[in-house]
Image (tube, rainbow, N blue to C red):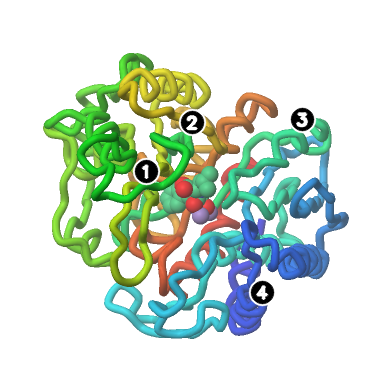
């Protein structure tokens, strides 16, 4: 395996790689927005074209009930291991639009403190187009220089940001086609440039809508105020009771399947070079808070959460209206860890939430998507290959990291395909994913393209 020619190819084609990534980012492939269905389709076609141009033998679009899945493969030798790369070409909505310094779908290179070499500012830059494209370009470099050391498959979907509703049936149906020895994903974060990391834990997720109703119709707040239940007040009280004063979640049975890492691992985590200031600075938070007895890193990595994502009801227009609303709504999500099961937690939540409602209101709970947590085993050839690759290109041994985000399909890869996943992300938590001014460092992009061939080389032996 001639690593040098691969790296030379990357060096020669740097500018083109960036221009190509920009062209992909310009397509507003917002999976949740119907009006962007055509764009999302166009983005899938572009990804397919790039895979063809990279030199993959088969690159096809698989239609689903939603957005298509792009699948491609280059099989060089059945005796060699197979890497299945997963990523997503869909993005989150860009709003609030007026908080973007440059238009969300016009990739603009700007320097920042953490990205002195410049970063591409645009929706999807780091989550996940930039990170997914790392693999397309790394594989192109390996194929075009005759250095691809093992078989490779790509499965790039367009519905990750809406909970991958059509991917589970797809992987169940195409088990044989998707057969592999490891799944490789770049859709998570690095601790920092100096302290590389490999994500070994992803949280699970359950997401629900709740509705609290106290009457058939809204009422005059003078004639009825004080004599009837106000569903917004009731909803707020109910939500407030879901955590105690230590910020521990009060739903009975909620923690039954949570196993904490050993004291040894927790000590490692406490010592992880986590930069609280940078962390706070990116969204400009005024302070940090969370469950007592845990560090910030533990709070996002190994603890479950319960958060209100949105709440509405009553009068929210300009001016004032004296009204007792009949209905209040909230969107509530919980991040899950360890052995928590999202269906079971949804059950526990619904039962508990209904049980704490006063007789004056009726409560409805409507679950959305969900997914289970995932932990990558570290005593595998694949993990060691990722470690060796990062050691080689960063000059530093990566630390295992538990991350707060979720990629729900990963637990299902394990269940259905019976393959473990390596989460080798190249973004930073401070890159503003899902926020205005999302960006992806050029250094991170090129470092990723350099590291992926090193992983393939280490994994193929
Ligand atoms: N790439 C993220 C998840 C992520 C980011 C994990 C950074 C770890 C570090 C992914 O695209 C994402 O946003 N997932 C959603 C899942 C949901 C839409 C089902 C999430 O975590 O909210
Ligand atoms: Mn993502
Ligand atoms: Mn995302």
Q: In which quarter of the image is the N terminus?
A: bottom right
Q: Name which residue lies at 72% across and 49% down.
A: 155
Crowd around label 2: few <14 · some 14–19 · many ≥20 (10 Å): many
Q: How far apart are labels 1 and 4 at the CA level? A: 28 Å
Q: Quadrant of the C terminus?
A: top right
Instruction: Check disc 2 and report the residue beneath it.
Output: 365
| Residue 404 picture location, percent across and down | 37, 43
Q: Which of the two marks, 2 or 3, is nearer to us in this view?
A: 2
**Which element carries disc 1, helix, strand or loop?**
loop
Placement of 315 over or under 178, stated as above or below: below
Q: Are marks 2 and 4 in contact (CB under 8 Å)?
A: no
Placement of 398 over or under 119, stated as above or below: above
Q: Which of the two marks, 1 or 2, is nearer to us in this view?
A: 2
Q: Is residue 212 something that shows in the picture?
A: no
**Which element carries disc 4, helix, strand or loop?**
loop
**Which element carries disc 2, helix, strand or loop?**
strand
Q: How far apart are labels 4 and 3 at the CA level? A: 30 Å
Label of residue 404 in the image? 1
Q: Name which residue lies at 38% across and 55% down.
A: 190
Crowd around label 4: few <14 · some 14–19 · many ≥20 (10 Å): many
| Residue 185 picture location, percent across and down | 57, 48
Q: Which of 453 and 33 is in front in this view?
A: 33
Placement of 294 over or under 113, stated as above or below: above
Instruction: Check disc 3 and report the residue beneath it.
Output: 172
Q: Name which residue lies at 38% across and 60% down.
A: 428
């Amino acid at each position: 395996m001639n690593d040098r020619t691969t790296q030379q190819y990357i060096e020669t084609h740097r500018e083109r790689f960036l221009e190509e990534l920009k062209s992909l980012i310009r397509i507003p492939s917002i999976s949740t927005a119907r009006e962007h269905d055509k764009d999302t389709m166009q983005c899938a076609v572009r990804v397919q074209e790039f895979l063809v141009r990279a030199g993959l033998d088969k690159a096809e679009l698989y239609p689903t009930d939603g957005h298509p899945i792009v699948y491609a493969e280059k099989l060089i030798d059945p005796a060699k291991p197979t890497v299945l790369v997963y990523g997503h070409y869909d993005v989150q909505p860009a709003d609030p639009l007026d908080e973007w310094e440059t238009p969300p779908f016009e990739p603009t290179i700007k320097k920042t403190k953490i990205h002195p070499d410049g970063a591409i500012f645009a929706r999807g830059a780091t989550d996940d187009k930039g990170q997914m494209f790392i693999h397309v370009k790394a594989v192109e470099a390996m194929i075009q220089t005759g250095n691809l050391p093992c078989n490779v498959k790509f499965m790039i979907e367009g519905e990750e940001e809406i909970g991958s509703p059509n991917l589970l049936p797809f992987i169940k149906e195409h088990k044989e086609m998707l057969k592999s020895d490891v799944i490789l994903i770049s859709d998570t974060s690095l601790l920092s440039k100096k302290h590389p990391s490999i994500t070994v834990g992803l949280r699970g997720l359950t997401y629900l809508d709740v509705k609290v109703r106290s009457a058939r119709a809204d009422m005059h707040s003078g004639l009825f105020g004080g004599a009837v239940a106000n569903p917004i007040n009731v909803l707020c009280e109910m939500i407030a009771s879901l955590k105690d004063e230590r910020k521990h979640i009060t739903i009975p049975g909620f923690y039954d399947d949570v196993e904490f890492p050993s004291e040894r691992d927790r000590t490692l985590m406490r010592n992880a070079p986590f930069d609280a200031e940078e962390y706070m600075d990116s969204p400009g938070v005024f302070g940090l808070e969370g469950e007592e007895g845990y560090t910030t890193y533990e709070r996002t990595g190994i603890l479950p959460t319960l958060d209100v994502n949105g709440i509405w009801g009553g009068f929210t227009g300009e001016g004032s209206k004296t009204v007792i609303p009949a209905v209040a709504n909230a969107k509530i999500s919980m991040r899950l860890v360890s052995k928590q099961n999202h269906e079971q937690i949804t059950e526990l939540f619904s039962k508990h939430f209904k049980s704490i409602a006063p007789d004056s209101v009726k409560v409805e709970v409507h679950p959305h998507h969900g997914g289970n947590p995932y932990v990558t085993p570290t005593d595998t050839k694949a993990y060691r290959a990722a470690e060796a690759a990062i050691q080689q290109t960063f000059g530093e041994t990566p630390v295992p990291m538990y991350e707060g985000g979720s990629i729900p399909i990963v637990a299902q890869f394990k269940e259905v395909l019976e393959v473990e996943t390596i989460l080798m992300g190249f973004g930073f938590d401070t890159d503003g994913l899902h926020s205005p001014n999302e960006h992806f460092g050029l250094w991170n992009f090129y470092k990723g393209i350099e590291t992926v061939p090193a992983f393939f080389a280490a994994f193929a032996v």
